[in-house]
Amino acid sequence: MPGFFSNVFKLATGTMLAQVAGITLIPVVTRIYSPECLGVLQLFLSIATVIVIVSSLSYNLAVMLPEKDEDSINIFVLSIMCVTGISVATGAVVVGFADRIGEIFTTAAIADYLIWLPVFVILSGFSLILNEWLSRKVKYGVLSRSIVVSSISTRMFQIGGGLMTASPLGLILGSVMGLALANFFMFRGLKEDIGLLKAVTVQRMKDLAIRYREFSLFGTAASLANSMSWELPAFMLGLFFSSTILGYYALAMMAVRVPMMMVGTAVSQVFFQKASEEMNLTGGVQTVVQEIHTRLISISIFPFVIFIVLSEGLFTFIFGANWLIAGTYARILAPWLFAVFIISPISSLFGVMERQKAYLFFESVTLCTWALIFFIGGTSGDPIFTLALFSICGMLIWGSKSMYLIKASGAGYRGSAESLARHLLLSIIVSLPLIFGVYMGLAFLFLLGIAGITAIVYYLTIFFTDALIQREIKELAIGFFRPEHIDLIKRLSLFRYWN
């Protein structure tokens, strides 16, 4: 799939910088704010995320699909109008029922900060729509820069607010400001497309709203179920346990899921664009699924194995000794998060193949399962047991979703299953020195050095055994090196099969 990993690299360059900034600055945040503050922030973001996911009535997911830009810009404007309307309605509810919302979630402190909810919703909704449009136009450089701006500015505003007064307000305002600056950069990337707004008409928006009505009817319900399934753990942990436990969970998810989802989003956006393109050209997506999914497994499984081995030491080393429990939570959740990471990109096939009903079914089952799991775990009074049950069931549910999508695409399970088994075994074998070092109680910095060496061994093995990845790396090299340097590389046979 020529250019796939090159485009992912453009987005991942920004996300990697964002991750570095996040990993660098989160330890400062955790030393300023208490777990209780992070718990309130997590609850605020969970409420906001549920609203954001339905704010465009899922029409943003259709921006990528039309063949003509004139149709796509009409869907873009339709989505903007939907987000604006939902944000205004959210503001009205907040003004009238903020205290009641705090009572429902047994966290009275959240009521003081809900006034910022409609602002966060409209900024997040616009961000989702802009992401779809810029992905359609293959402007991954703009998206990359916006990700960096969002990550760094969010943390800087949070730190600045915390130095003045360490309350949840600093964390929430930091998130709002990060979104605002990211949107500013993305809107600037639209200047070449302003002329397309002349094609926007009320009648055309109505026609396209009807054409893609299943996105609104079934896609919105499915997206709501998906969002609720992601945010339900935060709601239930806060309900059955405490804001401190919720704070530990929030840091575990912030440190693992946020950078994971940044890279995953880059892969998903490029995959969606490639899959939509292949569907328009050939009427199927079998090739893109076969070529991408197995490589995604091979590239991503090793970091999760390393993380499971080092998670507790990593959390105490980076965030401080008070956050050891968050490291334990992260280790428990890692297998589920790996399943999410490798399956999320191909989840866009529900939209590409227009199977919104199946999407709704899977998300509804997931939501109901989560509710049952957290009720059982919550009544047990043991957060470790609750999260372990959640992680195991999560792997099973996401695996079922993967099997359905691969079968529906016509790609077949065999390649993905073989890739998973082969690279999991390779990851464990390569990681044996690190596992032995942990068992022997070696210093953490020494363990990090071993982890770095094993990573080099693993990825060199992947490079020299996968022809597609070799071709993609060569394509990247063409963009980075001058012609004379490429000739030197050829003469030195660094890329044996250079064409």
Image (spheres, rainbow, N blue to C red):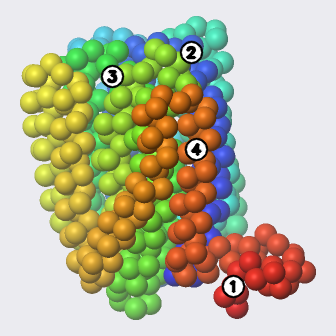
Q: What whole-number distance in Å separates the C-alpha atoms at marks 2 and 1?
A: 50 Å
The residue pinned by badge 2 equals: 31
Q: Residue at x 31, y 11 (%)?
A: 108
Which of the two labelled residues, at mark 1 and mark 3, occupies the earlier sequence position?
3
Q: Position of residue 285 (x, y in %)?
A: 37, 82
Q: Amino acid at mark 2?
A: Arg
Q: Position of residue 255 (x, y in %)?
A: 48, 35
In front: label 2 or label 4: 4
The residue pinned by badge 3 equals: 246
Q: Residue at x 55, y 25 (%)?
A: 317
Q: Residue furthest top?
A: 165
Q: Is residue 315 above or below residue 290?
A: above
In front: label 3 or label 4: 4
Q: Residue at x 35, y 89 (%)?
A: 283
Q: Amino acid at mark 1?
A: Arg
The residue pinned by badge 4 equals: 450
Q: Is 411 on the left or on the right of 64, as rendered? A: left
Which of the two labelled residues, at mark 3 and mark 2, occupies the earlier sequence position?
2
Q: Are marks 2 and 4 in contact (CB under 8 Å)?
A: no
Q: Is residue 481 above or below residue 315?
A: below
The residue pinned by badge 1 equals: 496
Q: Is 184 on the left or on the right of 455, as rendered? A: right
Q: Secondary structure at mark 1?
A: loop
In front: label 4 or label 1: 4
